[in-house]
């Protein structure tokens, strides 16, 4: 394999790695925007709508993707600094996903803290 094709393969792998980490949080936010419910006390008496459950499933899917991404960091680079940075990125995006889970659950159910 030539140097250029190896570099393109690595760039594609890193691009897919990053896109997989962003897919579920973006989908959670889109669901929250499309299926927004206004805050109302009656929302606490009713069952949450289906988008609220979908947001929860998307979060757990993102969690599984994050674990897989952390496991794959070791095979994608030999340099410890790149590994540390990639691991920090995964954990940072996971923290943002937790925040999006809370915000999107409130938006889709109409139940606010």
Image: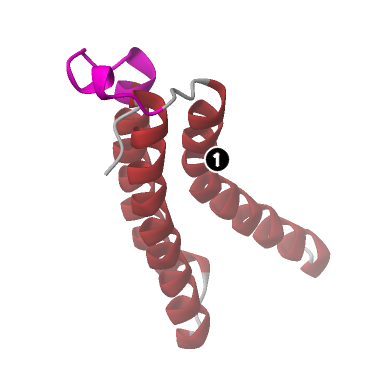
**x then y, percent, for residue 74:** 41, 69
Question: Is residue 1 visible to the viewer in this orientation of the structure?
Answer: no
Name the residue: 50% across, 27% down: 31
Q: Is residue 93 left or right of residue 40?
A: right
Report the quarter where the C terminus lies. top left
**Direction from residue 15 to residue 76 in the image, left or right:** left
Bounds of the magenta span?
39-53
Q: Is residue 41 visible?
A: yes
Tag 1 secondary structure: helix
The x, y position of residue 27, in whole percent, is: 52, 33
- Identify whether 5 is placed above or below 32: below
- What crowding class fits label 1: few (fewer than 14 Cα within 10 Å), some (14-19), or many (20 or more)? some
Residue furthest out toward the front? 41
The quarter of the picture where the N terminus appears is bottom right
Residue highlighted by disc 1? 26
Q: Which color scheme did the rendering employ for the protein?
A: secondary structure
Report how many numbered discs are placed on residues in the image. 1
Q: Position of residue 83 (x, y in %)?
A: 45, 77
> At 41% across and 71% down in the image, what residue appears?
87
At 17% across and 16% down in the image, what residue appears? 45
Q: Is 56 or 81 nearer to us in this picture?
A: 56
Image position of 12 with respect to 70: above or below: above
Q: Is residue 110 left or right of residue 35?
A: left
User: Against 101, is 43 above or below?
Assistant: above
Q: Any magenta on residue 74?
A: no
């Amino acid at each position: 394999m030539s140097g250029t094709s190896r570099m393109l393969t690595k760039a594609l792998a890193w691009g897919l790695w990053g896109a997989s980490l962003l897919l579920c949080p973006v989908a959670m936010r889109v669901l929250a925007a499309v299926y927004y419910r206004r805050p109302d006390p009656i929302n606490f008496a009713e069952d949450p709508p289906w988008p609220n459950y979908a947001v929860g499933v998307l979060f757990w899917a993102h969690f599984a993707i994050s674990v897989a991404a952390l496991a794959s960091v070791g095979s994608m680079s030999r340099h410890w600094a790149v590994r540390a940075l990639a691991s920090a990125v995964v954990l940072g995006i996971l923290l943002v996903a937790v925040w999006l889970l809370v915000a999107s659950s409130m938006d889709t159910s109409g139940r606010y803290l």
